[in-house]
Image: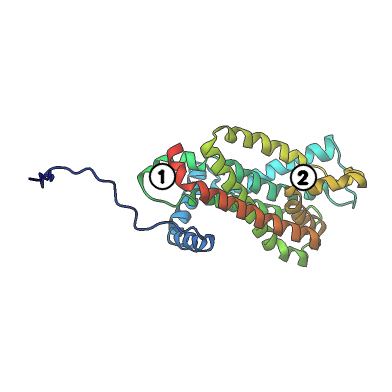
Amino acid sequence: MDVHNEPAADEAVETFPAPPRFRPSRVWGRRLAEDRAELARFWPVVQNMVVQDLRVRYQRSFMGFLWTLVNPLLMMFTLSMVFSQIMPMRMGDGGSYTLYLLAGMVPWGFMAGSITEASTCIIQNEVLIRKIYVPKLVFPLVRVLINLATSMFSLAALFLVLVPLGARPSPAMLFLPVGVALTFVFTLGLSLIVATANTFFRDCGHLVGVFIQAWYFATPIIYPLSQFPEDLRWRFWLNPAFYFVEMFHDVLNAGRLPRLDVVLIAAVLAAVSLGVGYATFKANEDKMVFRL
């Protein structure tokens, strides 16, 4: 006689959880479409986080959002006084060094601020990530958008002093939205990379600050290329930030359109940066929660 041991109805049966009904697509094209749809659905969340951060940043100050205009102007004019009076820099084309400095500080401030803040954005939002579902792409995107808003105020402040510094409006300024868009894409890609790296290796957060400082001095922002001999200037072409800063120098300082090769290289760098950053972030997205 066979005996069958069947579990009682009220006895707990140990089983594995059912597989998720939705599995992420392994096809990058479809994954891109899914992320676009998801970001569109969470776009009000992104807007609220950006506005809330900017509002909290200046809510108890007397001048409020005016500090977004005053801060960059104070920093820019401090540097211009140091490098035009104490340590004078010679401009090869005879232009205004102050305007050259201000034009370079706008894109650099955006890139440096975004990358630095994005490196810790996943770790700082650990509580929110564990409580509710929010696409992790939102957090580096929010940091980049916040710095983009701040840089737009800095750009507005720069326009206020263009005429006093001797610059004149030119048709080349219509290129500025293209330069801003390329810089945004490039910066977002790097932000995704550092956000991923620092989540898994916390030392990266400290290294980012050192790297940004070294990168700043390796980029022609506080000094013009005319300070270097012709046979040494090719070294700056190895610096990815050079092309984005140079576009702003050409438009705002020289009043001319950037060279086509500079724009094309900037576009390629932006596309590669975003592609590598997105692939790196998505490949490690599901593992991040275990490293928080």
Residue located farthest toward the front when viewing the structure as drawn: 1
From this view, report whether residue 133 is shown above or below residue 30: above
* Residue at 55% over, 38% down: 198
Q: Earlier in the sequence, mark 1 or mark 2?
A: 1
Identity, as a three-letter code, of the amino acid under mark 1: Ile
Residue located beneath label 1 in the image: 129
Which residue corresponds to mark 2?
Answer: 221
From the image, which quarter does the C terminus lie in?
top left
Residue at image position (90%, 52%) is 93
Q: Position of residue 6 (x, y in %)?
A: 12, 46
Residue at 78 percent across and 47 percent down: it is: 238
Do residues under tags 1 and 2 come within 8 Å of each other at their CB atoms?
A: no
Query: Looking at the picture, does residue 105 appear above or below residue 163?
Result: above
User: As shown in the figure, which amino acid type bears the numbered disc 2?
Assistant: Ile
Residue drawn at the location 92% of the way across and 46% of the way down: 231
Tell me the SS state at disc 1: helix
144 sits to left or right of 45 = right
Residue 41, given in percent of the width and then of the height, sits at 43, 61
195 w.r.t. 253: above or below = above
